[in-house]
Image (tube, rainbow, N blue to C red):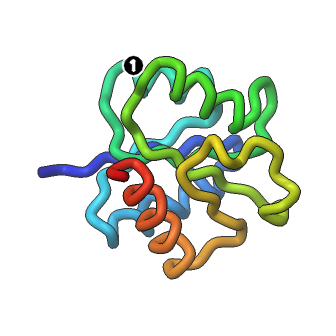
Amino acid sequence: MRKWALVVDDDVAVRTILPPLLKAYHYDTEAAGGPGEALERIARRAFDVIFTDYEMPGMSGIELVRIIRERSFRSAVILMTGLVADEVPGSSLADALLQKPFTMDTIRRALDEAMARRRG
């Protein structure tokens, strides 16, 4: 069974770097440059996990997480940020937090934590 991930970030570098890293964990990945594009993609495909940046123009990652939760999408959501975890208001809405810059180990931990919360 194929697993799908969506990467939402206004930073093209993150949208370019993260998908190949997720391939190592057997995820096919799509990328969106912002929340509007992400919601369009979510409407067309079910994603197992959504990685979203915390700070984006127009709509924050927290606002995107709220919309995902309100619309009852079953995707696990991982919030990506360069801020310290204690400085991220609303991060408890996400299933996991991924600190930037990330490594393969931190990606794996965030995936494991997010999937466990979705199953639990």
In this view, 22 is above or below 15: below
Identify which amino acid the numbered label 1 is placed on. Answer: Ala
Residue 26: image location, x then y, percent: 26, 64
- How many marks on residues? 1
Q: Label 1: state its secondary structure.
A: helix
> Where is mark 1, residue-wise?
43
**Residue at the (33%, 72%) spot, across then down:** 24
In the image, taking residue 36 as reference, residue 100 lies left or right, namely: right
**Residue at the (31%, 57%) spot, across then down:** 27
- Image quadrant of residue 62? top right
**Residue at the (77%, 37%) spot, across then down:** 56
**Residue at the (38%, 56%) spot, across then down:** 115
In this view, 115 is above or below 100: above
Residue 35: image location, x then y, percent: 62, 28
Task: Give the residue furthest to the front.
Answer: 120
Residue 20: image location, x then y, percent: 41, 64
Q: Nearer the viewer, residue 106 or 114?
A: 114
Residue 9: image location, x then y, percent: 65, 44
